[in-house]
Image: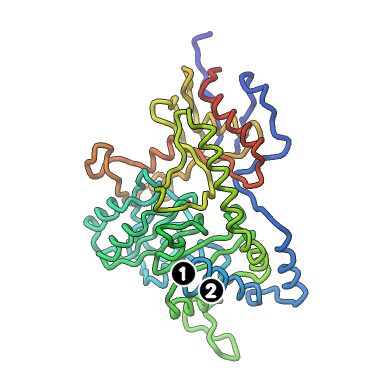
Amino acid sequence: MGNVFTPEKTNTVSGSSHRIPAAFSDIPRFENPVWLSSPTMHGDELRFVEEAYRTNWMSTIGANIDAIEEQICRKVGCGYAVGLNCGTSAIHLALRLAGIKPGDKVFCSDLTFDATVNPVSYEGGKQIFIDSEYETWNMDPEALERAFKLYPDVKIVIAANLYGTPAKMDEIRAVCDAHNAILIEDAAESLGAVYKGRQTGSFGKYNAISFNGNKIITGSAGGMILTDDPEAAKKARKWSTQSRENAPWYQHRELGYNYRMSNVVAGVVRGQIPYLDDHISRKKEIYFRYKEGLKDMPVSMNPYIAGVMEPNFWLSCILIDRDAMCEQVRSDSEAFYRKSKSGTTCPTEIFEKLMAHNAQARPIWKPMHMQPLYRTNPFVAAKTPAGEPGGFDVGADIFERGLCLPSDNKMTPEQQEIIIEIIRRCFTQVE
């Protein structure tokens, strides 16, 4: 039965089948997990949380919220910030401010987390997904321009900055302006990143950031909507507190939401903000250690345009060269691969081997148009490699060949060297 092949099988949801094969047995398993991106706390956070507790400001107003709204405005360079319970709420309120109505179509980044696009459905809208380009992995401005020719009535665009790398915001804004469309920038992953000398989170008419537990700085939860429009900020603040009117009783003239940030969560964020640049510096070191350690392997790092943009390097990712890919098949919940020769591997194998050694990796975001929830939605593809318009699915290709590597800024250089060795060995070892 030596010619019968049983493919490796990975449950990419639970990771339950991971094991260390003989060819990797000399590499020690990490005693404690090396995380993809976990919170990095400094102690200052407790001071502001305790202040909220001591002064009894435990609800959705207080000094911590006031402070971080002002500090983020100063950092990003926007006029107004409204603290919310999460970044998804910020996108939802941005859509309401943009005037979305049931049945409206909205152009959305395709290669992103579904929190970028789900709020369109909250308002009864319809997402039209725009493919990525290879220079940044973000929304392709040329595909966006073609999308407007196909759907000229669209008036809202949501563009995300993937893994901390800015999209080509000048080009995207120019397309939006030419078609009288409102740009919403999803900067949930890119706080602190810079494009042409300007901070992300400031390019849209309305912008969203996140303080989720895995982000560059965190409050354990939380987010903000950012804008230069004082009336929009006033509306967002009102909507986020159940649209309560200025009356001695609970008076409501319009629909509102329980979206306001807690002063306790804001205390954690307040303690994190001074360390934002330090976190970015550490993430950058991780990125370039991977880049150096894998420079002679058939992979490339998640890209950015040097001299034009400076990412926050939130997650370090790799893209395997096409001719170095072994066979790989994915269902909606499982992945299979078959490796027949040295010099090849696939994201599924690297993912499996890293997880077996207690190092957390993650597949690239699965494009929205491939998700069961959105498979019937329109999708506007990028140009083919030969330059013809449409027909080439860049996002699906990045998902197929890409992988997010352990990027925790508490990971030591020694731990990262072991991770690099595991990746290198995936190319050289055939079981």
Q: Quadrant of residue 354?
A: top right
Q: Position of residue 236 (x, y in %)?
A: 49, 75
Q: Position of residue 127 (x, y in %)?
A: 36, 57
The secondary structure type at the circle numbered 2 is loop
Type of amino acid at the residue the image marks with label 2: Ser
Question: Extreme front residue here?
Answer: 307
The secondary structure type at the circle numbered 1 is helix
Q: Which residue shows up at 56% across the image and 24% down it?
A: 425
Side of 377 relative to 24 (left or right): left
Are the residues tagged 2 and 1 within 8 Å (C-beta)?
Answer: yes
Q: Which residue shows up at 56% across the image and 76% down it?
A: 241
Q: Which residue shows up at 52% across the image and 71% down it?
A: 73
In this picture, is 424 found above or below 253? above
In this picture, is 400 found above or below 240? above
Judging depth in this view, the residue of 109 and 274 nearest the camera is 274
- Name the residue tied to disc 2: 240
Q: Quadrant of residue 147?
A: bottom left
On residue 93, the disc is 1
Q: Position of residue 108 (x, y in %)?
A: 37, 56
Question: Extreme right residue here?
Answer: 54
Judging depth in this view, the residue of 131 and 99 nearest the camera is 131
Q: Position of residue 110 (x, y in %)?
A: 39, 50
Q: Which residue shows up at 43% across the image and 60% down it?
A: 197
Quarter of the picture containing the C terminus is top right
Instruction: Tell me how far mark 2 sits from mark 1, CA to CA.
Output: 8 Å
Type of amino acid at the residue the image marks with label 1: Leu
Side of 338 relative to 47 (left or right): left
Judging depth in this view, the residue of 368 and 83 nearest the camera is 83
Question: Residue 355, can we see it?
Answer: yes
